[in-house]
Image (cartoon, helix red, strand yellow):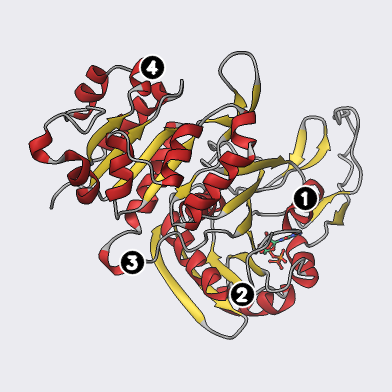
């Protein structure tokens, strides 16, 4: 089988150096990569670097090797075009269809999925001109990854950083994986949608050093967030005690306890089209929190721990439905009577879909794989065979997408 052909467009921003890492990940994972830098990108990283790392020519202009008609051929034969970093200028050119160099020509001739990973100063990103260009590109089917928040060039910080190259690679991999002939024309089907995903496990503190927690790694929730970004959604990821890298493009809100998670979820769902509660939320928390470390005392029995109920966030979100047509998805981790428990839980929680999986010490937690049954409130049940958590994530979004009938949240 031919290697998938990826065009890596690089425009002139300081983050161009990070694209070298993206290029490495793409080539090492079996892609044939053609780098198409802009002339300004070469001010940051030279042509020799792109050519050597990709094993392909890395010219910027349409006037080189004209007999091969590169301005048409490169775009036409690509399976994916990813532009990283995409500057404000590049987004403007792409939105308006300018074609004054090899990259902009390639963008006009490509019929494959296109991913832009913008990077620029916050003011440039927030400028209405840039925002309108981004909206135009998204409307036309491109995936434009939201920039990350953090240190920018110089001393300033804010939104505008290029996400981690490894995470941009994940978006590319996901988009490519969904662009085969059987999915041709589906495009980013969550474009214009806002989704909220909770992930990880809450920790309920007993004292400054101890907590009651659970074994959730957060991997399934992160896979859901990544998949939603690759399908064009704006994603808020509410992460409880995870140690995973931020998915590119997701707005990550970190929480610790069930009460903090509830607050973050309720704030985020106000304008969401869909909510997926993948987090393992503690049902109980210690009734009292000791300000100082609880000490053992010789000859004394330990004091019993009294627990109180935490609010059920999923049931609350389902009952409230912040927006008409909002799709609410829950998870159920069961050890026995998996389906029977799942069916009654679906009713009790009032959600549209419940993803039920069997858990145990050796199963699911921390693993890269999962197996589940998706129960729907209309009575349908879809078994999802054992496979990567990202595959389950996609099946869940397929079910969500099919239920998103209301116009997008705004
Ligand atoms: N959940 C929640 N708030 C809680 C507990 C759970 O939002 N306080 C959500 C989880 O995110 C998950 C779903 O509810 O999507 C199922 O959680 P689970 O703990 O399995 O359900 P419980 O209602 O706690 O049922 P039981 O303890 O009887 O298994």
Left or right placement of residue 224 versus residue 266 in this view: left
Residue identified by numbered label 4: 44
Q: Earlier in the sequence, mark 1 or mark 2?
A: 1
Q: Nearer the viewer, mark 4 or mark 1?
A: 4
Residue 267 in picture, x, y percent from top left: 78, 52
Left or right placement of residue 277 versus residue 391 in this view: right
Residue identified by numbered label 1: 258
Q: Earlier in the sequence, mark 2 or mark 4?
A: 4
Residue identified by numbered label 2: 342
**Label 4: few (<14), some or many (≥20) within 10 Å?**
some
Q: Report, in whole angstroms, how far the alpha carbon at label 2 lies from the one at label 4.
A: 55 Å
Compared to residue 377, the image places residue 317 above or below, namely above
Q: Report, in whole angstroms, how far the alpha carbon at label 3 lies from the one at label 4.
A: 37 Å
Left or right placement of residue 42 versus residue 214 in this view: left
Residue 87 in picture, x, y percent from top left: 47, 31
Q: Residue at x 26, y 24 (%)?
A: 50
Frontmost residue, 193 versus 269: 193
């Amino acid at each position: 089988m031919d290697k998938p052909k990826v065009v890596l467009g690089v425009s002139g921003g300081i983050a161009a150096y990070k694209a070298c890492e993206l290029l490495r990940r793409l080539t090492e994972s079996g892609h044939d990569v053609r780098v198409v830098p802009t002339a300004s990108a070469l001010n940051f990283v030279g042509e020799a670097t792109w050519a050597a790392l990709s094993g392909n020519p890395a010219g910027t202009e349409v006037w080189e090797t004209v007999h091969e008609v590169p301005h048409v051929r490169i775009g036409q034969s690509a399976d994916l075009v990813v532009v990283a970093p995409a500057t404000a200028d590049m987004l403007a050119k792409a939105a308006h269809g300018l074609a004054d160099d090899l990259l902009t020509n390639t963008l006009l001739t490509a019929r494959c999925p296109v991913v832009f990973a913008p990077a620029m100063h916050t003011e440039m990103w927030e400028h209405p001109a840039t925002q309108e260009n981004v909206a135009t590109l998204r409307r036309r089917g491109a995936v434009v990854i939201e920039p990350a928040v953090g240190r920018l060039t110089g001393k300033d910080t804010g939104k505008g950083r290029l996400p981690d190259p490894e995470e941009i690679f994940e978006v590319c991999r996901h988009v490519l994986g969904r662009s085969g002939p059987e999915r041709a024309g589906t495009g980013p089907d969550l474009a214009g949608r806002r989704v909220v995903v909770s992930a990880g496990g809450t920790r309920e503190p007993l004292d400054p050093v101890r907590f009651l927690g659970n074994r959730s790694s957060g991997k399934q929730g992160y896979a859901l967030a990544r998949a939603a970004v690759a399908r064009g959604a704006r994603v808020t990821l509410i992460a409880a005690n995870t140690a995973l890298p931020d998915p590119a493009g997701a707005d990550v809100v970190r929480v610790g306890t069930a009460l903090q998670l509830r607050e973050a979820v309720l704030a985020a769902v106000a304008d969401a089209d869909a909510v997926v509660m993948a987090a393992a939320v503690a049902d109980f928390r210690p009734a009292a929190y000791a300000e100082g470390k609880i000490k053992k005392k010789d000859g004394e029995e330990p004091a019993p721990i009294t627990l109180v109920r935490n609010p059920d966030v999923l049931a609350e979100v389902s009952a409230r439905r912040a927006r008409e047509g909002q799709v609410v998805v829950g998870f159920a981790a069961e050890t026995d009577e998996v389906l029977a428990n799942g069916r009654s839980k679906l009713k009790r929680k009032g959600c549209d879909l419940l993803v039920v999986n069997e858990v145990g010490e050796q199963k699911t937690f921390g693993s890269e794989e999962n197996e589940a049954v998706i129960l729907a409130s209309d009575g349908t049940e879809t078994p999802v065979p054992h496979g990567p958590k990202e595959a389950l994530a996609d099946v869940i979004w397929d079910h969500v997408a099919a239920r998103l009938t209301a116009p997008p949240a705004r």
